Image (tube, helix red, strand yellow):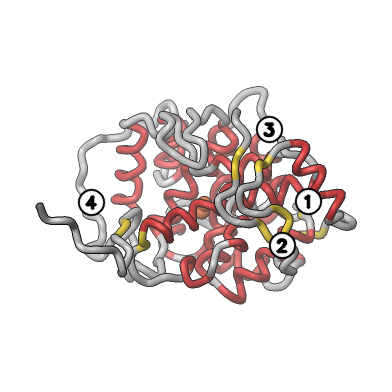
């Protein structure tokens, strides 16, 4: 894979610039940044003991949209029991604290994508892979790079402009850079998840446009889209209902953007009988309707862009 080139700088939450815009993210530049700015001791802390994380996760799992997946206390207890021993690094906790204070949507989203991806990995149960434990070890880090995105963009209540979107997309490279710098390992699951969770199976994603073949990251990608659709966003006052969100994902699997088996597994998690991913029959018939004010993925021209040229 080609090394990523940064379009914007990467700074820690303390404001230390680790990588300037234009830097290449390679083994050498990451090790050099660690020399210039040592990340300090990597003391792991229990995620559920941090702040209000335990209660927040419990509340979020009980909310209506997720009630089909966490169908009863057993499912919630299973996730919380799995997370009991989940220990994460201070950089992860600092990002959660930041989002909880500044951008509640991203805080909620980070926790829910994390919890859902553990459920999905459990349900998929691919032989020879312990994806569930890999996700737990990575922690709620997929959007950690959003600490490098201006809050005016993250919390914007209107459609993003092209330059907003370009800046927002920087969160993948930024998350990768921060996590690779912190751990010293650019191949660690957390760094890969942060970098590749917007890549797609058919190569239609970003930042590199690779054909994503990393089941761990693909699980996060499916949960990421699902949560984005079923959540209220600053720019969308109505969320997708569960059926419509699952139909959107099924369509993406049908167009080869997402791996079908993973989407089927998510659909199965929403069924009371919990069939296996392979046995879950998914209809392609569309019956749901996206919310009328949906701006998901919509980009508008810059406000001061010149009017179109007339010949
Ligand atoms: Fe993301
Ligand atoms: Fe996300």
Task: Please tell me whether residue 246 is drawn above or below residue 212 in the rendered image.
Answer: below
Q: Residue at x 25, y 56 (%)?
A: 290
Residue indicated by mark 2: 12
In this view, which residue lies farthest toward the top? 128
Q: Residue at x 76, y 54 (%)?
A: 88
Q: Work out whether residue 166 or residue 247 is closer to the camera in this orientation and state it.
A: 166
Viewport quadrant of the N terminus? top right
The reply to whether dot 3 and dot 1 touch (C-beta < 8 Å) is no
User: Could one spot residue 3 in this view of the protein?
Assistant: yes
Which numbered disc, 3 or 4, marks the residue that appears first in the sequence? Answer: 3
Which numbered disc, 1 or 2, marks the residue that appears first in the sequence? Answer: 2
Residue 232: x, y in percent? 40, 66
Residue indicated by mark 3: 130
Mark 2: C-beta under 8 Å from nearest atom of ligand 1: no
Residue 143: x, y in percent? 58, 54
Q: What element carries label 1?
A: helix
Classify 10 Å Cα crowding around label 4: few (below 14), some (14-19), many (20 and above): some
The reply to whether dot 3 and dot 2 touch (C-beta < 8 Å) is no
Q: Which residue is drawn at 53% across and 60% down?
A: 109
User: Could one spot residue 48 in this view of the protein?
Assistant: no
Foreground: disc 1 or disc 4: 1
Residue indicated by mark 4: 288
- Tag of residue 182: 1
Task: Please tell me whether residue 276 is drawn above or below residue 4 in the rendered image.
Answer: above
């Amino acid at each position: 894979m080609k090394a990523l080139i940064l379009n914007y700088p990467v700074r820690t939450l303390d404001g230390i610039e680790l990588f300037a815009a234009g830097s290449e993210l390679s083994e050498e530049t990451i090790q050099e940044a660690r020399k210039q700015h040592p990340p300090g001791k990597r003391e792991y802390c229990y995620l559920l003991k941090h702040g209000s994380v335990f209660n927040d996760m419990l509340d979020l799992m009980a909310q209506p949209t997720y009630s089909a997946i966490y169908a009863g206390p057993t499912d919630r207890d299973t996730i919380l029991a799995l997370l009991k021993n989940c220990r994460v690094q201070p950089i992860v906790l600092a990002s959660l604290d930041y989002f909880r204070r500044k951008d509640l949507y991203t805080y909620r989203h980070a926790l829910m994508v994390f919890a859902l991806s553990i459920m999905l990995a459990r349900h998929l149960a691919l032989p020879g892979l312990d994806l569930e434990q890999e996700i737990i070890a990575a922690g709620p880090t997929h959007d950690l790079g959003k600490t490098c995105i201006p809050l005016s963009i993250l919390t914007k209540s209107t459609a993003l402009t092209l330059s907003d979107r370009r800046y927002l997309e920087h969160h993948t490279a930024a998350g990768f850079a921060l996590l690779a710098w912190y751990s010293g390992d650019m191949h660690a699951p957390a760094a890969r998840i942060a970098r590749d969770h917007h890549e797609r199976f058919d190569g239609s994603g970003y930042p590199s446009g690779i054909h994503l073949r990393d089941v761990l990251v693909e699980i996060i990608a499916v949960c990421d889209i699902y949560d984005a659709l079923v959540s209220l966003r600053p720019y969308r006052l109505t969320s997708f209902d569960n059926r419509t969100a699952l139909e959107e994902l099924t369509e993406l699997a049908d167009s080869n953007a997402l791996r079908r088996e993973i989407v089927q597994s998510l659909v199965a998690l929403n069924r009371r009988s919990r069939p296996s991913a392979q046995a879950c029959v998914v209809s392609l018939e569309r019956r749901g309707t996206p919310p009328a004010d949906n701006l998901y993925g919509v980009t508008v021209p810059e406000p001061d862009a010149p009017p179109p040229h007339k010949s």
